């Protein structure tokens, strides 16, 4: 239960920071979608890159643990 509440808290903080940033830009209808899509693409590329390196280091079957990143290291 506590872990789920931390996810909700950080999601709320993230949306709050986006709303605050939207008030400070000159044309939010143009720059906010570009920023949101760009940051999502950057996060996706980093996530896929880390997962690819993990599978390249350690066989996929041995990554079935609670902390696969530390297992791969």
Image (spheres, rainbow, N blue to C red):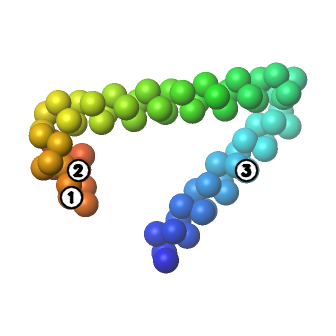
Residue 11 placement, left or right of 72:
right
Q: Residues within 10 Å of mark 2 (few under 14, many from 20)?
A: some
Looking at the rendered structure, the secondary structure element under dot 1 is loop
Residue 34 coordinates in the image, percent (x, y): 70, 23
Name the front one of labels 2 and 3: 2
- Using the numbered discs, state the Cα–Cα distance from disc 1 to disc 3 in whole angstroms: 34 Å
Q: Residue at x 81, y 36 (%)?
A: 22
Q: Earlier in the sequence, mark 1 or mark 3?
A: 3
Q: Is residue 11 above or below residue 21?
A: below
Q: Which residue is mark 2?
A: 68
Q: Nearer the viewer, residue 20 or 68?
A: 68
Q: Which residue is mark 3?
A: 16
Q: Earlier in the sequence, mark 2 or mark 3?
A: 3
In the picture, which quadrant includes the C terminus? top left
Looking at the rendered structure, the secondary structure element under dot 3 is helix
Q: Residue at x 76, y 29 (%)?
A: 32
Residue 20 coordinates in the image, percent (x, y): 78, 43
Looking at the rendered structure, the secondary structure element under dot 2 is helix
Q: Residues within 10 Å of mark 3 (few under 14, many from 20)?
A: few
Q: Which residue is mark 1?
A: 65
- Using the numbered discs, state the Cα–Cα distance from disc 2 to disc 1 in whole angstroms: 6 Å
Mark 2 in CB contact with mark 1 (< 8 angstroms): yes
Q: Is residue 16 above or below residue 42?
A: below
Q: Nearer the viewer, residue 60 or 16?
A: 60
Q: Residues within 10 Å of mark 1 (few under 14, many from 20)?
A: few
Mark 2 in CB contact with mark 3 (< 8 angstroms): no
């Amino acid at each position: 239960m506590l872990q789920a509440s931390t996810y909700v808290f950080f999601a709320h903080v993230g949306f709050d920071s986006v709303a605050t940033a939207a008030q400070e830009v000159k044309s939010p209808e143009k720059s906010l979608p570009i920023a949101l899509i760009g940051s999502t693409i950057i996060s996706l590329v980093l996530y896929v890159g880390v997962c690819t390196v993990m599978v390249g280091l350690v066989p996929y079957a041995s990554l079935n643990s609670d902390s696969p990143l530390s297992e791969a290291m």
